[in-house]
Amino acid sequence: MSFKDVMGHERPINLLQRAIAQEKVVNSYLFLGSEGIGKRLVALQFAKALNCLDGENKPDGCDRCLSCKKIDHRLHPDVSLIEPEGQTLKVDQVREMQRALAYRPYEGRRRVFILTAADRMAPNMSNTLLKTLEEPPLHTLIILLANNPRWILPTILSRCRSIRFNPLPAHLVSDWLTKEKGLEEKEAHLLASLSEGSPGKALEIKEEIAGIPRKKLLRGWMGAKSLSIEEQEGWIEYLPSQRENLHLILEMAKTLLRDLVVVKTLKDGSGLIHSDLTEEMEEIAGGWDLSSLLRRMEILHQTSQAIKGNANTRLSLEAMMISWAEG
Ligand SMILES: [Zn+2]
């Protein structure tokens, strides 16, 4: 694999390739973007392009030379991937990197250190790293990968060239899941819709999705015109108990309502995220008018934003149920 094989991320890749072509690669980069989106993959292709022994593909790796192959197999002595041991990156890991920085590259042109989870560093580690970034040795490249710039010290941010990675379009994630991971189209489509543009997240939520009662969510909640007090209380009990899956369930609920709107407006099941539930969708949508569905969608969206912003889950859900009943 090389730059040309990476799915999406044209803008970051163009920036990096231009830097190579114009010999303007700086000593430290910060790649920002959601977990699982492809930052690590691009960083590795960057390391390959910089150290490739075959000049023909410049500014890309050739994928055939010894250097490209060693990097692919994580066997290149000058390219290190530093990942957290447990929850955070440890200060020893940075010290080890500092020791290695004192030497010239063994066999490559550039010594490359890729620090994943740079937003999960202990404070003393940030200071150690800062010293390195202030006086970067020649022939070195440090690439920090992070999801959230808010957790990175401004002094570190200011010493790196930041490159933002945007979410991938759902259709690209879906294609990748079917072609590269062998998933069925229906499942790939659903996972891609809930992945927020991150192929890594799509794979990660695969198991969790299977445990979410989609039909029950549709019939018993999203699509139900009125709910008894017991039913309302049931949902208000159920959701906070799901903790880690809560956001995923609310995102799933949004896609169910979205599909009901699609069925209501287009009067057919093509383009549904939950295409396996088309019959149920058509039956339920028949009992609704469009403006009520849209209103319900809006209230659900506001509720899920509030919960994401740390509002009390139970109170937010109660308020949502009351607004729904009023509509
Ligand atoms: Zn090569």
Image (cartoon, grey):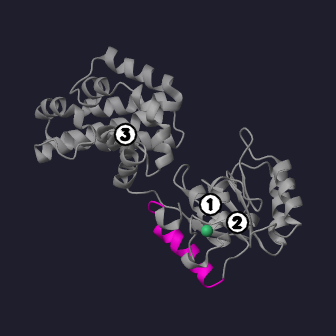
Q: Disc 2 vs disc 3: Cβ atoms closer than 8 Å?
A: no
- Looking at the rendering, in which quadrant would you find the C terminus? top left
Place of residue 68 in the rendered image (x, y in percent of width and height, measured from the top left): 63, 63
Using the image, determine if residue 254 lies above or below residue 222: below
Where residue 162 sits, quadrant-wise, is: bottom right
The answer to whether 166 appears left or right of 135 in the picture is left
* Between 83 and 165, the one nearer to me in the picture: 83
**Main secondary structure type of the part rendered in magenta:** helix
Question: Circle 1 is placed at which residue position?
Answer: 44
Place of residue 244 in the rendered image (x, y in percent of width and height, measured from the top left): 53, 31
Residue type, label 2: Leu
The answer to whether 233 appears left or right of 67 in the picture is left
Q: Residues within 10 Å of mark 1 (few under 14, many from 20)?
A: many
Give the label on residue 157, or none. Answer: 2
> Element at badge 3?
loop
Residue, x 16% and y 41% (percent of image)?
269
Q: Residues within 10 Å of mark 3 (few under 14, many from 20)?
A: some
Where residue 140 sits, quadrant-wise, is: bottom right
Place of residue 26 in the rendered image (x, y in percent of width and height, measured from the top left): 70, 76
Is residue 9 among the parts visible in the rendering?
A: no
* Between 177 and 215, the one nearer to me in the picture: 177
Q: Residues within 10 Å of mark 2 (few under 14, many from 20)?
A: some
Per the rendered image, the range of residues in magenta is 6-23
> Element at badge 1?
helix
Question: Circle 3 is placed at which residue position?
Answer: 183
Q: Residue furthest bottom?
A: 22
Residue type, label 3: Leu
* Of labels 1 and 2, the one closer to you: 1
The answer to whether 307 appears left or right of 152 in the picture is left
